[in-house]
Image: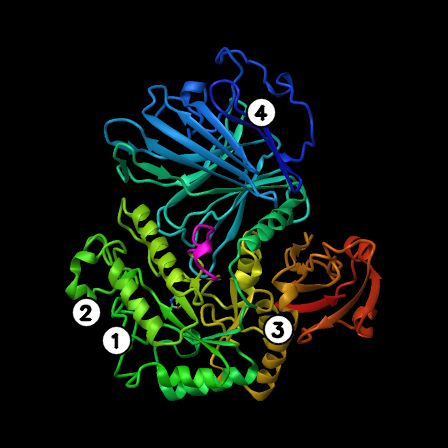
Amino acid sequence: MTVFHLRAAGVSLVLDTRGTAASVLHWGSDLGEFAFSEDAFTPAVPPSSIDVPLRLSLLPSLAEGWSGRPAIETGHGFRTVETQVQDQILRIRSSSPDATQEVVTELELTTQGVLRVRHRFTNRGDDEFVLPNLDVLLPIPAEATELLDFTGLWSHERSPQRAPLRHGVWSRESRHGRPGHDDAFLMVAGTPGLGFRSGRVWAVHLAWSGDKRVWAERSALGYSVLGAGELLAPGEIRLAPGESYETPWLVAVFSDTGLDGLSDRLHPWIRSTSTLRKPRPVVLNTWEAVYFDHDLAVLNELADAAAEVGVERFVLDDGWFTGRRDDRRALGDWFVDDTVWPDGLHPLISRVHERGMEFGLWVEPEMISPDSVLAREHPDWILGGTIGPTWRWQRVLDVEKAYHYLLDRLTALLTEYPIAFLKWDHNRDLLTPGVAHRQTRALYRLLAALKEAFPHVEIESCASGGARIDLGILPLVDRFWTSDTNDPLDRQSIQRWTGLLIPPEYLGGHLGDGVAHVTGRTSALGFRLATALFGSAGIEWNLTGASPAEKADIAAWIAEHQRLRPLLHSGRVVRADSPDPAHLVHGVVAQDRSHAVYALVTLGTPAAALPPPIRFPGLDPDRLYTVRPIGVPPRTMQDAPPPWLAAGAVTLPGRVLSELGLPAPLLTPEQALLLELA
Ligand code: DGJ
């Protein structure tokens, strides 16, 4: 066979291996079965160009006439030597003209319609080969002229940015040694005006937790591409004869129903690979409750208060290990501080267990404080030595060199204490050139070893909040800390956009203090609760100071979360396109569309006296739904509420609810109304 047509879940991939190099002829909507016609897929030859039709191969290069960014900066082309197909996986072996370089490309179209592509490069020559780069490129059609990707900063992750795709390269590069708060995350190209529910969109994500680049290029040659790969420093990958380098997976998704259609493929695919064994427990994390001020009596009281409202997992954050009284010292000394904890963590863990909760512990294994026993004993383990400034007063530990120490220490802790969960933090950029590849691989190895030894211990990927949320680390972790801000206003946007790629059950979202610690903004309890309801829910607040009324609301919220959790963590995530940016509607609809929960959220003052109606995307048009408010009633400013809300319920077909919607109540800014449909 020379032309391959893979089809799944409304997506087609047509790949042509005729001629010298394999190329993707189509990645997008399902083309149905058809008899392939070479003529129909071959472009014209323009003037002042190469004399044969330009075909963009899987490894485009100057040699084939592609003067855009190449897949590998060697200039020469590759020729296909062998193709295998097995189920939905294609393997294509290509070789350089002198046969000293071999690339095996793997393409898989999953049953959910997600395309995964990666290359494995092998040095078949007799000399060492320094790999300059190796990227994966996919063609996208000319109609995709609008770009959406993400940027951000600490506590403002995944801030969307849009731009037209003009001739040239729009490249997002991460040199943090972690994806970073400004990670491009998902690069989306689509038809102009693309929204949550409309537009044809193509998107790529690189499943990698180190340095990377992802780009879109529209070339004057007439092709547009999305590409991504690890960002390698000069000389970072040196391959001895016979050695190989494998790129991270490029995860590529197409949707002809807007951005929600991307999640509709990504979430089921991620869930199909999930190792989560049980409902996501409601967490209480001690960070914003006590910071470094660890005291058994206070923490016991907090554990009691947590259990009283129904918390299921109590997580002891930073501050428990030798000498760690602030953020200036002690990283690396992973021994329980016996001045603060004379009997170890046992008394606290016993209390937590007695109250029916699991126990979790914070660690930051990849870091080292210059002021630590570890740094004094192993200065050679500090990545980059003392070059460059410290960051949060810490430096990076060379995980390869310290591998056995870290594995031993973590093993000792997990063996001595019944720990169900590790919050695994990473609080600075690497800032050392040429090490991100091996550091990331060493991290993956360490996580995999721990997972194997302690399969029941869950791990959360945290990096100063959400600076390491990617599909490379996902198979090794069970939760992401989405952001360090618990301010619900910021969280609405961060969760909305992070949830484009990551299903909500992986995204930690906590109820914070009334005055948000990061922003100082005051928010109503109902808004905070509604914002933290949908993901992996938790609390980050010193509950011992909460009033009885607040505790009652929190307890009711936890019970509601537990009741709705099977729906929230398995359903389809939907977001309405709103004509008013101050007015959002998002929700989760059961896969069989029998049940749904939505939130109407006001981020600010509405643009008109009457806000837009609440339209409910994703419902079964022919089914009758009864809409009921749940949760803490939001604050309103209106002379009369819409009668359906005053009545407490209304029953209508899904078609009416999705197309026409219901009149919205006039919520004041920063409020949320939760609605359940069944
Ligand atoms: C950064 C994390 O994102 C916070 O949640 C907290 O764990 C601190 N580090 C502790 O140092």
Cα separation, mark 1 vs mark 3, equals 37 Å
Is the CB of the residue bearing disc 3 within 8 angstroms of ligand 1? Answer: no
Position of 80 relative to 152 (above/below): above
User: Residue drawn at (70%, 32%), measured in percent from left and top?
Assistant: 32
Cα separation, mark 4 vs mark 2, equals 61 Å
Q: Is residue 610 left or right of residue 364?
A: right
Position of 302 relative to 647 (above/below): below
Q: Amino acid at mark 4?
A: Val
Can see residue 604? no
Q: Amino acid at mark 2?
A: Val
Q: Amino acid at mark 3?
A: Gln
Can see residue 11? yes
User: Which tag is nearer the camera, tag 1 or tag 3?
Assistant: 3
Residue 179 versus residue 351: which sits nearer the camera?
A: 351
Q: Which residue is mark 2?
A: 373
Where is residue 596 drawn, in percent x and y?
71, 63
User: Which tag is nearer the camera, tag 4 or tag 3?
Assistant: 4
Q: Which residue is mark 3?
A: 562
Cα separation, mark 4 vs mark 1, equals 62 Å
Q: Which residues are magenta?
A: 468-479
User: Residue drawn at (68%, 58%), measured in percent from left and top?
Assistant: 607
User: Which tag is nearer the camera, tag 2 or tag 3?
Assistant: 3
Where is residue 144 drawn, in percent x and y?
59, 35
Cα separation, mark 2 vs mark 1, equals 9 Å
